Image (tube, rainbow, N blue to C red):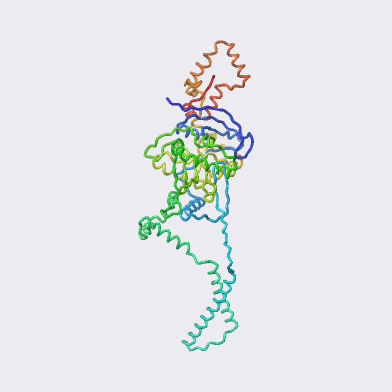
Amino acid sequence: MDYSLINYYGYQKSRCGYCKGVKCSNSHGMHAYGLTPQEYQDLIDRGWRRAGLYCYKPDNIKTCCPCYTIKCDALEFKLTKTHKKILRRMNRFLRDGKKEQHEERIENSMDTERNCEESGIIDVPKTDINLADIVTKTRENCTTNLQNKQNAQIKNVSQDANIAIPKTSASSQLCENSEQNDSSQQCEISLERPVCKKAKQMRLERRRTKLALRGISEETATASKSKIQNKEKSLQDYINDTTASDKHKLKLILVEVNSNQFRNTLMKTFALYKKYQILIHNDPPLDVNSYLEFLQESPIEMIEPVNGAPTGYGSFHQQYWLDDKLIAVGVIDILPYCVSSVYFFYDPDYSFLSLGTYASLREIEFVQQLSTHVDAIKYYYMGFYIHSCPKMRYKGKLAPSYLLCPESYSWCLLTQEIRDKLDENKYQRLNSNLSDEDPNKFEIRDLDKVRLLVNQRHFVTYPQYIQSFKIKHIDNILDIIRSRIYKEITGENDDRDIIIEYCKLVGKKCAHRLTYFKNDI
């Protein structure tokens, strides 16, 4: 029988990656040698998160920056104006390949990037032609032509009406000069700013081109449009707003982390990761083994697809290919109820596309696709929401989002009320109903069903462990005294206390399914 194996490390103190404090980040850690997708789903629903094979659960009461597990309901997701702007920007880039001219503003978070804009500088080419002379001569020509035209019109009118035209007064001369100046200014403007098509006309032409490529007549499309005129454009509509005539093609490829396809693209993904770490995070380059330990190794067991789903459960890399170039990689876990985002890295040369936010939208849309095959999959997990770190609050902009209460382990809608409470105190029991308790709470009586692997050979329950490996080998009171003295000298934790601590952290369901590694040698 296969067992999911855990090596619990206990309480850990480390440097905080959010506030940059030293030895102020407090958490519980364990090494996972293997987990089923359901077991890891249960763990993240209790505030755990993985980095490679290492799993950790922040101690939100004591740690410097409390971390609240956050998820978004992908089926109820609502696009904001910012999201629509980013999706349109990507579609325009794919269509014509042009970078938009915006002031660059890059905000880096701990594990991904959000809200990037392009900095555009237009270089005016140098020339020997004096543009001012051309404008002056053109103004003079326009004035002469206008005067000749007006004289001819006046002559024609006087001949037809047989009316004597009086000499031009000062006021009429002023009006005439004003008209001449307006005309000359129009000529000057037409020289300085060439005539271009109106935006509406360009949109109509693009629409006709798309319809022609799809073999749809404009009349049919207009009739269909009138029926769905009030329907809001969906996330999938924005993503699918591409044509065969686009200059660039963006393709997403889902790669299982232990597949040949992953190994074939390893050097390209590793090179992209190094570039991202150096240019975005200013970190020294890692070797390929460190990269694999962090983003390729996963304790989650691969499960084959069910109900005709495009993929099964497990850990994957979602590769973003722009034509033949790899520009981004999203590391994700597909679990029974969700898609969990692990990490995201991208080519800094494409920061103007806001790839971090764009990837979040694509991952939400991926959840929506999976939900059509597996009803239970409906959430997008984004890791931790750290309200005390302003750069990490961007996750709450994907609505509706829910935070995991660290005491009742229930989900609470992220509202302004909760944000205000976190402003007052960075640690909060998010569930205001004090009668709500942890439904998966571990009790002492549940200890009898906890499984252990002793000395890498024996799979036993906790009562069997006590009977066979503790009491059985202590023959007399002298051995008991020696054992206690040894624990006081070495500082060794009591087995029962540390096992109970672990069980409470993972919850009763996981405590009974997982196997606790215990080495007594």
Query: Which quadrant would the C terminus be assigned to in this image?
Result: top right
Badge count: 0
Q: Which residue is drawn at 57% across and 57% down?
A: 121
Q: Which residue lies furthest to the front in this view?
A: 128
Is 237 located above or below residue 329 in the figure?
below
Q: How far from the left and from the top, in percent, is residue 329?
A: 49, 43
Is residue 380 at least partly visible in the picture? yes
- For this view, does 482 lie left or right of residue 456? right
Q: In which quarter of the image is the N terminus?
A: top left
Query: Residue 381: percent from the left, percent from the top?
Result: 49, 40
Q: Residue at x 55, y 45 (%)?
A: 113
Asked whether residue 50 is in view, the answer is: no
| Looking at the image, residue 231 lies above or below residue 154 | above
Q: Which of 88 and 273 is in front in this view?
A: 273
Residue 354 image position (x, y, % from top left): 52, 49
Picture quadrant of residue 309? top left
Q: Give residue 479's position: percent from left, percent from top.
A: 58, 12
